[in-house]
Structures are given as structure tokens and as C-alpha cells.
Amino acid sequence: MKVATIRSLVCLGIESTADNLGVGIATSNGAILANEISTHVPEEGGIHPREAARHHAEQMGSTIGEALQDARVKAEELDLIAFSQGPGLGPSLRTGATAARALASYLNVPLVGVNHCVAHIEIGRLATGAEDPLTLYVSGGNTIVTGYEAGRYRIFGETLDIAVGNCLDTFSREAGLPYPGGPAVEKHALEGERLILLPYVVKGMDLSFSGLLTALIQEYRTGRWRLEDLCFSLQEIAYSMLGEVTERALAHTKKAELLLTGGVAANKRLRSIIGAIAEEHGASPEFVPIGYATDNGAMIAWTGILAYQSGIETPIETSYIDSRWRLDRVEVLWRD
Ligand code: AMP
Ligand code: MG
């Protein structure tokens, strides 16, 4: 018999929405015991969904093994298995879901399907101690300004086309910079000084990065500009757009905390813009630590615990992935 009321729950979470395979282990006390990440690096071009899925399948066993070892937990001691159920790339998601189902049924423990975007917010709250932040979530696949209101994470603004991280990655690939593009663009931007005119597209509370990307690539191909100035301009324009929408949402919601999360949250220029906005509005700026910024399994494990403790379980029969599962469709039962 499991005495779950006395000791804390231990959950293993599998993240596999895109190019990262993550396996994390969290407890209901809020301790992260392991956070293993194995990244698929494409030989050329962007992420190929089937190649990424093959990588995840190949690395699944060893990544789970390493996470258990780091946590000093035996598989039989796990109380719960969580997995990212969406949104993301179908083949990658299915690989993670298959492993999670197999583990849960073998160990005879509950399974919880977690929304990837919710998990980015929840790990940000856990890691920074923010209670009710307005959140800017920026990554390779998502660009969302969100805040909790009446049972859900409401979307105040989002991209209408590509994510900001995708814009950085695609430009850097075109310019022959190393993958992933965000850090490479950031490094070159430090040496930039000239602002090149590029499309700044904010429509109401939503954003668009595809016109900016196309114009940037065209300017790059003319050979007229220094790469440093192109990177500098890309950062200034893209991050100002993010800042504008975030600031309006913060002014409207009057939240006392402003959280920056997702892979692009590692960027120092974006952090300084978000920090300035928070200060201007008397909110406290909160930055997710780098290890939890990018896609990871710890955030899935932790969110799995929150969901399970509020009565949510995902029966194996209905544990299909949903590659388009929107953040604001999730009922967030663990918050007041
Ligand atoms: P994620 O999708 O959350 O795993 O985050 C990956 C994205 O974060 C990719 O698009 C990266 O280019 C981006 N990224 C990582 N580090 C940085 C950085 N220092 N500046 C900007 N973007 C970054
Ligand atoms: Mg992500």
C-alpha cells in the first residue's frame, strides 16, 4: 500500500514537443530532483518532425535512466507519470506519450497529460516564487502574453504567425550562424550599433514576425549591411514589439509581478526591456532560471503534480496528443 499522505508524491515528467527530449523528476514539496535534457540537432535546415521523433525514441531509455539516477529514485518509487500532451509537433509528442503510457501502465500509477504552455508558466512560478504574474512566454514555438483570470490562463496577446524564437533561428540559419539562433544573434547584436529599418508589426494586442523575418533576409542578401547591425536591429525591433504588448497587458491587469519564461527568456536584452517595464509599473520582474527556460521535463513533472493533486488524471484510453492544444483551453483547477 502506498502511503502518499505521509511522504510527498514523486512524479516523472516527459517533455517532447519539439527538438528537446526532457525527463524531469519533481516532488509535491516543490523539489526538482532531476532535469535531463537531450537535444536533437538537425544536420541541416530546421527541425524535421520525424527526425526529432526518432531522436527522442532512441534517447528515451537512457534519458529516463539518467533522470532516475540523478534523483536517486527507483522506478518503483514513482507515484505518477506526466507527459506533454500538446501543443507541439505530432511525431515528437507521440513518442513522449507512448513512453509515458508504457511507464504508467507498467508501474501501475496514474498518468497525467500536461499542457506544455501551462508548464512553462508553472515552472516559472515555482522557480521564482512569483504568485500571480503577468507572463511573457517566448520560445521556439510560442509567443504568448498571458495572465491568470477566473480559472484559466487567459491569452492577452500572441503571435499571429511564427514564434519569435523561430524568427531568430530561421534568420541565423540563413546567415550561417550556429544553431540555435537566439544566442548567436544575441552575441553579434552586442557589436551592432546601426538600426536598420524593418517591419514592426503589432496588431492590437497580437504580433507578427513573418514580415520582419522576410525583410531581414532580403536585407541580409543585399550584402549592404554588417551582420552585427542586422542582429542588433532584429533584436531591437522584435523585443520592442514584445515589450509594447506586454506593457499594455501589465497596465491593464495591474498584476504585481511580471514573469519572463521560455527559451528566449535567456536573452539579456529582452530581460532588460522586461525589467524596465516592470519597474515603470511597480511590478517585480521575475526571470525563469536558464535551466528551466528552455523545454524541459521538470516543468512537466511539476505541473503533473499540481494537476493530479487537484483531481486531474488522464486515462490511457483517452491520452491522445493534441498538437494544437491552446493554453486558454486548460482549466487551471489548482489556482483559486
Ligand atoms: P524552447 O522552445 O523553449 O526550447 O526555446 C528555444 C528557443 O530559445 C530557440 O528559438 C532559441 O533560439 C531561443 N533562445 C535560446 N537562448 C536564447 C538567447 N540567449 N536569446 C534569444 N533566444 C534564445
Ligand atoms: Mg517550449
Image: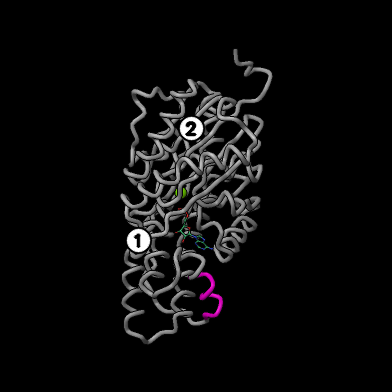
Please name the residue shown 38% across and 73% down the image.
198
On-image quarter of the N terminus: top right
Q: Residue 155 at what x, y percent from top left?
A: 43, 44
Helix or strand or loop: what does disc 2 sit on? Answer: strand
Which amino acid, mark 2?
Ala
Q: Residue 48 colored magenta?
A: no
Say whether residue 187 is magenta. yes
The answer to whether residue 147 shows anywhere in this view is no
Q: Which residues are magenta?
A: 185-192
Q: Is residue 41 above or below residue 54?
A: below
The answer to whether residue 256 shows anywhere in this view is yes
Q: Classify residue 72 by image quadrant.
A: top right
- Measured as percent of width and height from the top left, residue 123 is found at 57, 42
Q: Main secondary structure of the magenta part?
A: helix
Judging by the rendered image, the residue that carries numbered circle 1 is: 46
With 286 as the anchor, is 167 left or right in this view?
A: left
110 relative to 122, above or below: above
Q: How many neighbours does mark 1 have within 10 angstroms: few (below 14), some (14-19), or many (20 or more)?
A: some
- Residue toward you, 235 or 87: 87
Query: 125 above or below 151?
Result: below
Placement of 296 over or under 246, stated as above or below: above
| Residue under the image location 35 percent in, 48 percent down | 54
Q: Which residue is mark 2?
A: 82
* Tag 1: amino acid: Gly
Residue 152 percent location from the top left of the image:
47, 34
Compare residues 83 and 86 and report the one nearer the observer: 83
Badge 2 density bin: few <14, some 14–19, many ≥20, Cα 10 Å: many
C-alpha separation, residue under disc 1 versus residue under disc 2: 28 Å
Q: Earlier in the sequence, mark 1 or mark 2?
A: 1
Assign a secondary structure to mark 1. Answer: loop
